[in-house]
Amino acid sequence: MDRLDLKFLALGAAMLVVGVSMGIYMGIVHDFQLSPVHAHVNLVGWVSLSLFGIVYKLFPELQARRLAKLHFAFAAPAGVVFPFGIALAVLAEKPLLAIVASLLWFVGTILFLIQIAGLALARSANRTLVAAE
């Protein structure tokens, strides 16, 4: 198995360090212009990527699906690049990277929804079969 749970968790932890470092720096210099970047590093990077990892750990059957690798292929790079795209938009008025990364992130979230819906449907079908027996 590819251990996508650990890959998501490691990436999420790395983004936590980036987000905390950014927050400390902004507080020290009293410059909060990049607050939206800080928020996205923490929410998209730390929280979302880590939650993906936790879900894949809790439901290892999801990791075995080909869709899981596709989910990681979209969500991992987008989760890292999206905040930097926001920084470019704020600092240089160049939003293209943020736009592209946000669309990749959106695809990743849809793939995750499909994974969770598939899991829910499979478990519901299993319960129905057990109850009918």
Image (tube, rainbow, N blue to C red):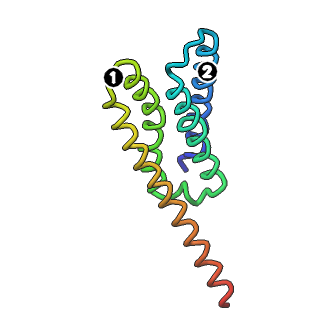
Q: Which tag is nearer the camera, tag 1 or tag 2? A: 1
- Asked if residue 62 is positioned above or below residue 11 in the image, the reply reads below
Q: Amino acid at mark 1?
A: Glu
Dot label at residue 105: none
- Asked if residue 92 is positioned above or below residue 4 in the image, the reply reads above
Dot label at residue 23: 2
The residue closer to the viewer here, 72 or 40, is: 40
Where disc 2 sits, the SS reads helix
x, y percentage for residue 68?
Answer: 48, 53
Q: Residue at x 58, y 60 (%)?
A: 61
Return the disc, 1 or 2, that comes first in the chain's sequence.
2
Residue 17 appears left or right of 91: right
Q: Dot 2, how many residues are within 10 Å of its Cα: few (below 14), some (14-19), or many (20+)?
A: some
Q: Residue at x 57, y 37 (%)?
A: 43
Dot label at residue 93: 1
Check the image and name the residue furthest to the bottom. 133
Question: Residues at badges 1 and 2 in contact (C-beta under 8 Å)?
Answer: no
